[in-house]
């Protein structure tokens, strides 16, 4: 039989007004309100799904099972905002070539300053050239926005430098006020479904994990009734 304490450290009630209770998974204000943000490209739909009680339909394939995932530091979750890549599929051949040439220049500069290794440089250059010649799809470029390259080529200033008059979608957050009981998990990895199902069965509104060496702070909300207020806010993409 699965031992729940292997996965759950404790149950935290938002009414406790403990400012350190949730770490960076949620923010506790001086007025004891618990606030967190969800990153999305369709905030109106998120709010409507919350109203309908469909929180488990928002983020499906995630660490603590289906739910709506939030954090007190939404900037680190911009990776979940997929709308910023939509422009790639609409690029003409000449626009795609211009973007690839710009990325190649960025890679050359990163190699010149030793930001990336020679092997990382060669591997990336090969992929970009394959995309430019349409041997690989433009979505291959997405990995260059992450470690070790961190080329934010979807941002408007980068697109302008590439000679492209294109504006990619910007992420938005839904600010949420939360109330309920939440399970602090020991890790966000390999949590059995039976544990999640049991927590829901005993009336737990969601689960969270604090920042650590192996975990990014996040909270999953399963029960929409735990969300007592929402507000759409813009977020800057780092």
Image: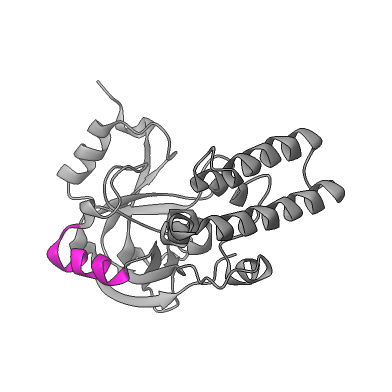
Between residue 88 and residue 206, name the one nearer to us.
88
Between residue 144 and residue 53, name the one nearer to us.
144
Where is residue 88 drawn, in percent x and y?
48, 56
The boundaries of the magenta stretch are 43-54
Where is residue 218 drawn, in percent x and y?
43, 53
Q: Quadrant of the C terminus?
A: bottom right
Q: Residue furthest top?
A: 1
Where is residue 83 drawn, in percent x and y?
41, 61
Q: Is residue 21 visible?
A: no
Residue 131: say if magenta. no
Between residue 162 and residue 49, name the one nearer to us.
162
Q: Quadrant of the N terminus?
A: top left
Where is residue 160 drawn, in percent x and y?
63, 71
Image: 235 above or below 61: below
Q: How is the image coloured?
A: one colour
Residue at 28%, 51% (x, y): give it.
206
Residue at 37%, 65% (x, y): give it.
41
Residue 45: say if magenta. yes
Quadrant assignment, res 46: bottom left
Residue at 33%, 70% (x, y): give it.
176
Left or right: residue 30 versus residue 8 is right
Residue at 47%, 57% (x, y): give it.
85
């Amino acid at each position: 039989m699965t031992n729940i304490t292997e996965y759950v450290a404790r149950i935290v009630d938002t009414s406790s007004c403990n400012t350190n209770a949730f770490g960076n998974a949620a923010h506790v204000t001086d007025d004891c309100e618990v606030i967190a943000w969800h990153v999305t490209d369709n905030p109106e739909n998120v709010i409507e799904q919350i109203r309908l009680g469909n929180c488990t339909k928002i983020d499906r394939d995630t660490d603590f099972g289906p739910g709506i995932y939030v954090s007190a530091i939404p900037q680190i979750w911009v990776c979940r905002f997929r709308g910023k890549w939509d422009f790639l599929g609409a690029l003409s051949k000449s626009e795609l070539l211009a973007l690839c040439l710009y990325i190649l220049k960025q890679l050359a500069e990163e190699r010149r300053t030793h930001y990336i290794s020679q092997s990382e440089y060669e591997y990336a250059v090969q992929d970009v050239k394959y995309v430019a010649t349409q041997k690989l799809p433009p979505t291959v470029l997405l990995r260059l926005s992450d470690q070790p390259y961190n080329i934010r080529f979807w941002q408007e200033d980068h697109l302008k430098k590439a000679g492209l008059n294109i504006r990619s979608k910007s992420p938005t957050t839904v600010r949420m006020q939360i109330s309920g009981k939440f399970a602090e998990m020991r890790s966000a990895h390999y949590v059995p479904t039976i544990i999640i199902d049991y927590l829901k069965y005993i009336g737990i509104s969601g689960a969270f994990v604090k920042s650590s060496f192996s975990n990014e702070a996040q909270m999953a909300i399963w029960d929409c009734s735990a969300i007592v207020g929402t507000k759409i806010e813009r977020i800057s993409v780092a």
